[in-house]
Image (cartoon, rainbow, N blue to C red):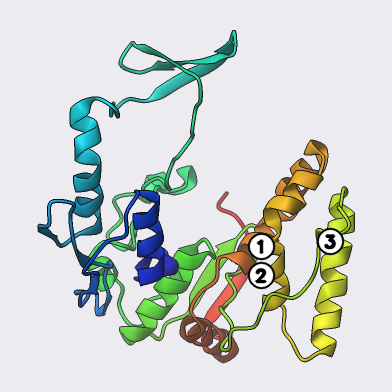
Amino acid sequence: MKADDRKCRQPDDEAVDDRLGRRTADVELLDRPPVNGKAGRCRRKTRSAEGENVDEVGDYVASELAPYLSSGAIEHRRALVLGIRRSAGRWTISSSDDQELVADIVVIAVSHPAPALPKALLPVLSHPKLVSDPTKAGAFEVIASADRVLIVGNGLTSADVVAALGGRGHYGPIISISRRGLRSRGHPAVVQDPYGDFVSEPITRASELLRHIRQALHAARQQGLDWHPVLDAVRAQGQQIWQALPVVERQRIARLARPYWDAHRFRIAPQVETVLDQAVESGTLGILAASIA
């Protein structure tokens, strides 16, 4: 589970309620049970359309969808999509249940898959010191305080792992690897308004976009700002920026710049970033550019 997934934000909840056609009444944040001494998943109490209390967000959403499922307006099938093709202005989807569906519009709405080991690590799958899913309760109990630890990946979950081990009193050396040796950056201690204009004059080349961002970063520093408001402006204007770019330039950005964007876009809490900074400074944590061979 990523750090941002653990935050329970009431405005986000209300936005979901609005998209379902109504605003939820009686929203209440509940205490979150600890997992490995850390905050667990987020829960909330709300009322369904029938007025009954529902303790879990999933149960609430299910209660809202239930009338549509029972009426047949929504049909839920559990199957693997094997192929999709376009013909005569419509889509035909073939699935693992040996059925074909015809649709006017197709929406791809997938979430992250469950944690899976890289193929190179499958030979040590049964090793007692291997933690294949750090989100499971008690996952770190097999790690002794002085153990040397290798973390494969430098994203949000990696930051959570370092912070969780530190909270358990772990003091052994930790090496965290990713292909480019980048790690997630933190949220600012003080929120700043977005800074920069990337849409008034349409940008049509990836190199031109990068140059504009660097110029905005330089101007922001001269005004005593850091990089956060500049990247926030890029994010806020992202749809217009993307629409102005030809497909080949979008592909170039996705291939070359996305890892750097992700490291700055998907941020960790300032407190967690401080833990990582201190671990790097003390030599406890080493972050390397590497991959499993």
User: Considering the numbered disc 3 on the image, is that residue within a helix, a strand or a loop?
Assistant: helix
Residue 142 vs residue 235: left or right? Answer: left
Q: Is residue 5 above or below residue 239?
A: below
Residue on which disc 1 sits: 235
Residue nearer the viewer, 145 or 101 = 101
- Number of numbered tags placed on the structure image: 3
The residue lying at 71 percent from left, 47 percent from top is 254
**What SS does tag 1 mark?**
helix
Q: Which mark is residue 289?
A: none
Q: Which residue is mark 2?
A: 232
> Which image quadrant: the N terminus?
bottom left
Q: Residue furthest top?
A: 88
Pointers 1 and 3 in contact (C-beta within 8 Å): no
Question: 272 left or right of 27?
Answer: right
Q: Is residue 180 above or below residue 33?
A: above
Is residue 212 at least partly visible in the picture? yes
> What is the x, y in percent for residue 134?
34, 63
Query: Camera-side residue: 239 or 218?
Result: 239
Give the percent coordinates (x, y) of residue 166: 38, 84
Q: Amino acid at mark 1?
A: Arg
Picture quadrant of residue 23: bottom left
